[in-house]
Amino acid sequence: MLSVLFFMRLTMLKIVKKILKFLNSQSDPVEIAIGVILGLFVALLSPSLFNVIIIFLLALLLNCNFGVFFICAGLFKLITLITDPVGDIIGRFILTRDFLLPLWKAISEIPILTLTSFNNSVIMGNFLIGIFLIPLIWIVTIKSIEFYRKKLMDKVKKFKIVQFLTGADILEGREK
Amino acid sequence: MKIIRPTGIIFFTVFLALIIIFNIFFLNSTVKKILINTGEEIFRAVVEISKVDIKLTKSRIEIAGIKIADKDNEFKNLFEAEKIVFDYEFIPLLKKKIIIDDIELTGFATGTKREKSGKLSEKRIKEIEKKEKKQKQENKLFNGIVKKINDKSSGEIKKLPITKTINTAISLKDKSINDLIKKEDLESYKTIVNSKTKIENSKKDIENKLNSLNFDKRSDELKQKADSFKSVKISGVADIPSAQAKIKELDSLKNEVNSIKKEIETVKNDSEQLIKFTGNLPGEIKSAKDKDIQNIMSKMKLDILNAKHIETALIGPVWKSRIDKIFQIISLVNKYIPEGKKTKKKSYNEIVRKKGIDYIFISKQPSFWIKNIKISKSNKSDGVGISGKITDLCFEQILINKPCIAELNGKRDSKSINALIKIDRRQDINDLYQLKISGFNTDDMGFNNIDYGNIKFLNGVVSADLKANMDEQKINIDGNVNISNIKFDAQDKQDILYLIISSIDNMNIDFNAIAKESNFEFSVNSDILNKIDSGLKKLYGKKMQEAREKVEKNIDNFIKNDKDGLNKTASQATGEIKNKINELSKKSQVLDGYIDGIKNELLKKITDTQKGSAGDMIKGLFK
């Protein structure tokens, strides 16, 4: 059990190290933005395993930062405590509108699409919340990375903890 | 920046491969686990499946060794099937729809023995209940009747007390009886106290009325006035008119005497009411005492002597267990098959999930439809093999416009079972549930597990016939349960209730429940009431009479002084009042006579004067 916990902490440190390395490099911020958004959707649509698998496959295929994807999936899972009840209300409202019923009926006749559990009030509501948040998260993520690289990166690099994580890798004990 | 990660394609392929491998190695066990969990949620008992074989390429599923335990009889299986084989349609599965043309269910049996207990753990039951609580039960009518039946049965299904001997059943010691008597609470005591107050008040009231008559004063005045007419002299015809005027005055005095007499009469009427009241007192006290005796006897815990109570406690669990069986089926049907009218109106059905609600949109194809289930019976020596068929088991009947019909029949030796279920919810609800069994023993039916306290069923042959109709407005349940060759057992065989009940060898119970939204009628009758009653009378009749006499004697002791006091007060009051009124009546008669005498005297004078003057006139004519 202890070794499992130790391994998990080690993995988390590795992920944080990779994120810091990525932030401090000149890589495209879009990779991080895609990771954040996919992480958000994994968290929001997690009541359906099928959705999680599809998003995970997307994360594998798309050029996104995997570390960010995992960390965001975990962090955004916390906000589902708030979004689930709100999503439930939105989902119920949307799924029971008379004028939309033909659309839902048509979708429910499309193979595979039904497996996404779009007909569940929480998933539908959370999906709509996610869609609404995409532009916001996209802009905030890209602008934050740009701001970080211009204004904060040099100062952050001087922090010992950052140096420890990105430069002197004691945990692996060989690489600098 | 490239949107697609080249290495991602490799990862993607590996991941898909992993999913396929998982399906190959773990799909069967995963589906098995899901089936077991779902089955346990539905039947609230242990579900066992020995093997699930999913052939994806052939779209075929084979399930072997299914055992569903009976939650009311932990060492029996409700159902057991050797094998279930069916082919599913793959494309509807991708739309979350289950469409199956034919299911073959072989080796089907009920009532087979279990080696391990079929009871679920407390933890698992709590889990299921928690989940059920979240799910909406929309059928108000059905939920209403379940609640009412449960309320009724909870009031009736009680353990029978153990009563070792008659003397312990009825304690006739003075102390134990006296401990139960509180003088202030006795109806007879209350009646005595209230009556005494009433008599005293009435007496005062009558006395006041008599005093307010002012008889002596008025009598003296009238006498004096009458006396003044004695001195009237009539010396000639000329005095006659004034004398006649005096007679009129005497008449008015007489009228006054009459009004006094009337007033006395009114008071006399009041006094007669009082006399009548005191005359009725012994009867009133006796009926109050009877109530007291009943109360005290009920406090003496003589309830066991009530044949109706024993009958109710004995037959309650029997009818309740049969109705529960029907309710289990209806509850399951309600959960999954909504009425077509509602479905048509809303265009979707709702299923409450752990998170949110699933809206099942009604399209051309139903979400669940098994067209045909062929059931062939088990050849095992254990239980009763069942064969039959179920057609059109479908969640949205309105889409297929066919009711679901299940016909199941089983027979082994003397045991037989016939079930006919018609679930018709194409528009309104129009269901029929019919279940007939015969030749089963009490152990098969779970009656041997009924907790009556000291007494329990040991053996008996059960036949039952149940019929339930359910429509939009009402549920009607008719049932009959007959248990013959009954043998009871008791831990304590000296228990006198056991002695009475053990003489019952046959029990016939008829029950009927009609539930509408506005009212609920339930009746249950059995033929054992007379048997219990005569048994009780034989054992207790004499003792009961003795108990009654003893209680009556003790109550008499408690109220003796007060009763004597009341009698004294009553006889004194009535005596005094009677005397006074009689005296006044007599006096008024005397006064009346006195005035009459004066009047007659005056009339005589007038007549004499008239005669004298007439004689003088005649004499004058002949002079």
Image (tube, rainbow, N blue to C red):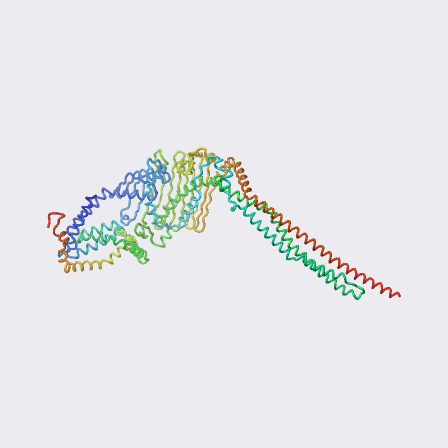
Q: Residue B151, can we see it?
A: yes
Q: Nearer the viewer, residue B188 or B101?
A: B188
Estimate the x, y position of residue A27 in percent, counting from the top left.
14, 56
Estimate the x, y position of residue B555 in percent, counting from the top left.
54, 42
Which residue, as the protein is rendered here, is positioned at the far right?
B623
Is A113 positioned to the left or the right of B521 in the image?
Answer: left
Q: Nearer the viewer, residue B602 or A42?
A: B602
Q: Nearer the viewer, residue A31 or B309?
A: B309
Estimate the x, y position of residue B256 in percent, counting from the top left.
69, 59
Count the numbered circles shown.
0
- Is A30 situated above or below B157? below
Q: Quadrant of the N terminus of chain A?
A: top left
- Is B13 situated above or below A96? above
The residue at 44%/34% (across/down) is: B486
Estimate the x, y position of residue A158 in percent, counting from the top left.
13, 56
Is B609 positioned to the left or the right of B562 in the image?
Answer: right
- Is B334 situated above or below B76? below
Q: Residue B505, can we see it?
A: no
Q: Nearer the viewer, residue A42 or B584?
A: B584
Is B174 positioned to the left or the right of B62 in the image?
Answer: right
